[in-house]
Amino acid sequence: MARGNSSCSETSPTVVDTLIGPQVVIRGDLTFSGGLYVEGRILGKVIAEDGASATLTVAEQGSIEGEVRAPVVIINGQLTGDVHAAERVELAANARVQGNVHYQVVEMSAGAQLTGRLIHATTAGATAALPAPEPSRAEPVTALQAETADA
């Protein structure tokens, strides 16, 4: 079933293969492929099958408490946990994310809230390999020294 999802993404309609309705609560980990549209609540990890073309969409009234791993993640509801998106993360206007977001491409609408870090996928490993910055060898300049130098 194809569904135009204007509340989450005006540029990319998503195909919905699985719908978790607003009255549904899932306790436990969930593995999926294709399009997963969440209007209900998931308490557990949500992970796309390896190599699958998958899009996870969390609707405005939807919520997930757990880690998320999918190529494309579109959030317009609540998510508590880390997000790992191999391709793209979209945080719509009503998104409320508590956790780190690992991404290749990120789109964040005005009004979206993120309590955590944005971590670009290609720089995550590179920053750990960088040496610590060396302390500055310059002597501090006081306000009095700066005034006398100007005079």
Image (cartoon, rainbow, N blue to C red):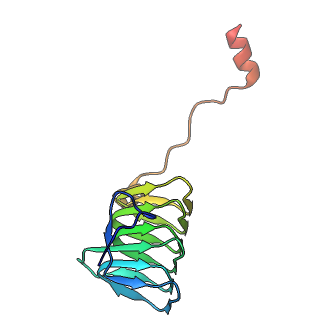
Image coordinates of residue 88 in percent, x first then y, are: 35, 62
Q: Is residue 38 left or right of residue 65?
A: left
Which residue of the protein is positioned furthest toward the bottom in this rendering?
27
Query: Which one is in front, 87 or 40?
Result: 40
- Residue visible at 35% across and 67% down in the picture: 4
The image quadrant that residue 105 belongs to is bottom left
Image coordinates of residue 119 in percent, x first then y, are: 44, 59
Which residue of the protein is positioned furthest toward the right in this rendering?
144
Which residue of the protein is positioned furthest toward the left in this rendering?
51
The image quadrant that residue 56 belongs to is bottom left
Using the image, determine if residue 151 lies above or below residue 36: above
- Residue visible at 63% across and 30% down in the picture: 139
Image coordinates of residue 46 in percent, x first then y, are: 41, 82
Query: Which one is in front, 3 or 128?
Result: 3
Q: Is residue 116 left or right of residue 31?
A: right
Query: Which one is in front, 24 or 47?
Result: 24
Using the image, determine if residue 39 lies above or below residue 107: below
Image coordinates of residue 8 in percent, x first then y, are: 44, 64
Which residue of the protein is positioned furthest toward the top in this rendering?
151
- Residue visible at 40% across and 61% down in the picture: 9
Q: Is residue 38 left or right of residue 70?
A: right
Query: Which one is in front, 142 or 118?
Result: 118
Quadrant of the drawing holding the N terminus:
bottom left
